[in-house]
Amino acid sequence: MSHCPDYSHLLVLPRLRVQAANAISSPLTHGFPSITAFIGLMWALQRKLVASGISGLKFRAVGVVCHRHQVLVNDAYIKGFSLTRNPIGRDGKTAAIVEEGRIHLQISLVLAVESAELGLDEAADQALAEQIAQMLQTMRIAGGVLLPAKRYTAPYWVAMTGDAAGRQALFEHLRLRLLPGFALVARDDLLAETLTTFQKENPEATVLDAWLSRSRLNWRYDNEEGRWQHDRPKGSGWVVPIPVGYAALTDIQAPGTVANARDEGTPFQFVESLYSLGEWVSPHRLQTAEQLLWYADSPPGQGLYRCRNDYRCNDDSDDEFYSIFD
């Protein structure tokens, strides 16, 4: 079973303001950018660092905490995305309207970094963090533009090089600095649990049936109480359908053999989206940094390109939040 790669430090890029990010995360889901966009951002940032001569850092995983969001939709009873009319084409004709979902965000990114060069000089480490933050300003996040912060908050490092108790104490301090906000974590366990329940009643039930059921509110009339109720009682969590990567539809094609490919020097493969369930949780409910971080998992020969997260639900997390003040 896969697990989060080893890392030595966390780089926290707090309170980033993103304008007009892509709110359509896959052919079937919308509402927040796909986690694949943030892992892609991590890899693109890695390439920029290497191109600038910084090769001693390796990004292993990324965590996302959303502090504010504003989806650009109309105010009708059935909401739709607010669309723009694009300029006319070169032929003078009106360009077609292509539905684009946009969302304004304020997020914090937590990058897991492996490096033997960090921790030797505090001033040099902070200068490097500032350089990475400035480099990020030139990039897009999930298609959105990064805006200057109204009140600048400097990026900072968290050294995760001590023993288990020391790492735990550092993360408990970090998770408070990420409040208020919500972190997106994986809940594959809920999907498996729902499928097991469905198959007890209907052996022909599929994973798609379970996923669709957990992606909506299912209402039923309670004859005893005389009112309609849904299947998400208070305290069941903010569970959402999310894309978690891609599955191969074909074998890998040699570079340059597929017409209209973006990069003729890279092998090509047709894929489709993979789906699972995620949950938005407050950072104070997370017990370790690994529960926050997302990482790539692509076993050779399986045709799977997945984003994974090591979150495990702990129903007693509320009590632990108050215990840290004792």
Image (tube, rainbow, N blue to C red):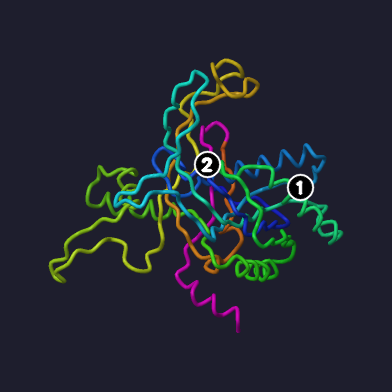
Please state the horizontal and vertical placement of residue 208, each as a whole percent of the image.
33, 43
Please state the horizontal and vertical placement of residue 91, each as a whole percent of the image.
49, 18
Report, in whole angstroms, how far the alpha carbon at label 1 lies from the one at label 2.
23 Å
Amino acid type, residue under disc 1 in the picture: Leu
Identify whether 257 is placed above or below 206: above
Left-right relation of 170 to 50: left
Left-right relation of 100 to 204: right
Circle 1 residues within 10 Å: few <14, some 14–19, many ≥20: some
Identify whether 155 is placed above or below 138: below
Please state the horizontal and vertical placement of residue 265, each as a whole percent of the image.
65, 21
The residue at 29%/52% (across/down) is 77
The residue at 66%/48% (across/down) is 60
- In terms of sequence position, does the residue under pointer 1 or pointer 2 come before the other? 1
The residue at 62%/23% (across/down) is 263
Task: In this rendered view, identify the residue nearer to me: 18 or 225.
Answer: 18
Q: Which quadrant is home to the C terminus?
A: bottom right
Magenta stretch encompasses residue 311: yes
Badges 1 and 2: C-beta atoms under 8 Å apart? no
Magenta stretch encompasses residue 107: no
Any mark on residue 12, and which? none
Q: Quadrant of residue 171?
A: bottom right
* Secondary element at tag 2: strand
Circle 2 residues within 10 Å: few <14, some 14–19, many ≥20: many
Q: How many marks?
A: 2
* Secondary element at tag 1: loop
Left-right relation of 9 to 26: right
The residue at 43%/33% (across/down) is 98
Amino acid type, residue under disc 2 in the picture: Arg
Please state the horizontal and vertical placement of residue 46, each as a whole percent of the image.
71, 42
Any mark on residue 57, and which? 1
What residue sits right under mark 2 in the picture?
306
- Find the magenta span and give its range: 300-326
